[in-house]
Amino acid sequence: MAPPSSNLSAVLYGINDLRLEERPVPEPKDNQALLRMEVVGIWWVRRTLLDHRKMWSVCVEKPMVIGHEASGTVLKVGKNVK
């Protein structure tokens, strides 16, 4: 399967400032895998970081790509991945 040509990412910039951005498709390092994502959840991030200002200063210091509880297909693995 060919690597994806785009990498649409949810990027958190600040409280109530979540943006969708195209980012470069990364090349996996020796101990990483490249996945074609099918589904990614962001519920916890929205409730915790977008809604609660106190958490923002503790958790985020710069724009951050968000998402968890993901499901996808392995496209490529680094040389140390078994």
Image (cartoon, helix red, strand yellow):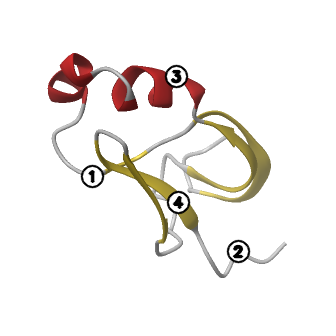
Task: Judge depth for marks 1 and 2 and give the one in front.
Answer: 1
Characterize the local packing of mark 3: few (<14), some (14-19) or many (20 or more) Cα atoms within 10 angstroms.
few
| Residue closest to the eye, 67 or 71 | 67
Residue wearing tag 2: 3
Is 42 situated above or below 52?
Answer: below
Residue wearing tag 1: 63
Task: Judge depth for marks 3 and 2 and give the one in front.
Answer: 3
Report x, y in % for residue 53.
23, 24
Q: For residue 6, what is the image quadrant? A: bottom right
| Circle 3: residue type | Trp
Q: Secondary structure at mark 4?
A: strand
| Circle 1: residue type | Pro
Residue wearing tag 3: 44
| Circle 4: residue type | Ser
- The residues tagged by marks 3 and 4 sit, at their Cα atoms, a distance apart of 17 Å
- The mark nearer the N terminus, 3 or 1, is 3
| Residue closest to the eye, 34 or 41 | 41
Report x, y in % for residue 41.
65, 35
- The mark nearer the N terminus, 1 or 2, is 2
Is 79 situated above or below 41?
Answer: below
Residue wearing tag 4: 9
Q: CB under 8 Å between callouts 1 and 2?
A: no
- The residues tagged by marks 1 and 4 sit, at their Cα atoms, a distance apart of 12 Å
